Amino acid sequence: MKTDKENIVIIPTYNEKENIRDIILYVLNLKEIFDILIVDDNSPDGTAQIVKELIEKYPERIFILERQGKLGLGTAYIEGFKWSLAQGYKYIYEMDADFSHNPDDLIRLHEACVKGADVAVGSRYKTGINVVNWPMSRILLSYFASKYVRFITGMKLTDTTAGFVCYHRKVLETINLDNIKMIGYAFQIEMKFKAYLNRFKIEEISIIFTDRRKGTSKMSGSIVGEAIWGVFKMKFQSVLCKKRYLK
């Protein structure tokens, strides 16, 4: 499909009123042009209303999908991917709303894909552990979770759970988005694994991840459990019948 739009950054939100205005304006003012799609899960704090006020000022650059409730990170991105593909965007990005991902690094992810990567991953662990303001327990959980996923899946990535990613549209067109099973943070693993099995070129770009300063983290024990057991099931299904798993 011929595309006439270059970059769209998908930002899922739930109660991000402290951050959403600042993150949107920051991205809009980057030297590269990045449009923004907010996928809001009916935030009771008025996040969506702030976005709509900004849309009035920048109707060609900011868009919003409003959902009926808190339906999971993975489903938010799936809806965002489908919308972005339908609009003709070439490079489609995932990014958090809370500045834990430095918006300046969008340019580096873009450059990696322009130079030949099909998927560019903002990696916290490519050059050591580049995480700021996390407690040691969470750093170790995240770091060894990536080690575990790498061992189980065979992927050569150092940060398999990263949520700061650029996809070339051909990757999202190839993956059956309706068949993605994981809805929490393990969604990030499943997307990378399916890109890996489809032999797309995945490149890691070293970033510094800084924990949110405003708002509340959405991490929970159920999310961790999905990652631990879901990865093993995912790998088992891919070995049992790779063609069926990729459909």
Image (cartoon, grey):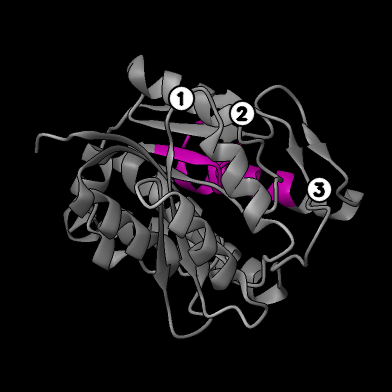
- Which range is magenta? 142-166
Nearer the observer, 111 or 158: 111
Residue sticking out furthest to the top: 115
Residue 169 at x, y = what percent? 25, 40
Q: Pointer 2: residues within 10 angstroms few (<14), some, or many (20+)? A: few
Q: CA distance from mark 2 to mark 3?
A: 26 Å
The residue indicated by pointer 3 is 140
Sequence order check, earlier mark of 2 and 3? 2
- Identify the mark at residue 32; answer none if there is no mark: 1
- Identify the mark at residue 219; answer none if there is no mark: none
- Say what secondary structure mark 2 lies in: loop
Residues at badges 2 and 3 in contact (C-beta under 8 Å)?
A: no
Q: Is residue 158 magenta?
A: yes
Residue 5 at x, y = what percent? 25, 36
Q: Quadrant of the C terminus?
A: bottom left
Name the residue at 43% across, 36% down: 34
Residue sticking out furthest to the left: 1
Q: Which amino acid type corresponds to the residue marked 2 in the rendered image?
A: Asp
Residues at badges 2 and 1 in contact (C-beta under 8 Å)?
A: no
In this image, 77 relative to 169: left or right?
right
Q: Is residue 72 above or below residue 206?
A: below
The residue indicated by pointer 2 is 104
Q: Nearer the viewer, mark 2 or mark 3?
A: 2
Nearer the observer, 138 or 36: 36
- Say what secondary structure mark 1 lies in: loop
- Say what secondary structure mark 3 lies in: helix
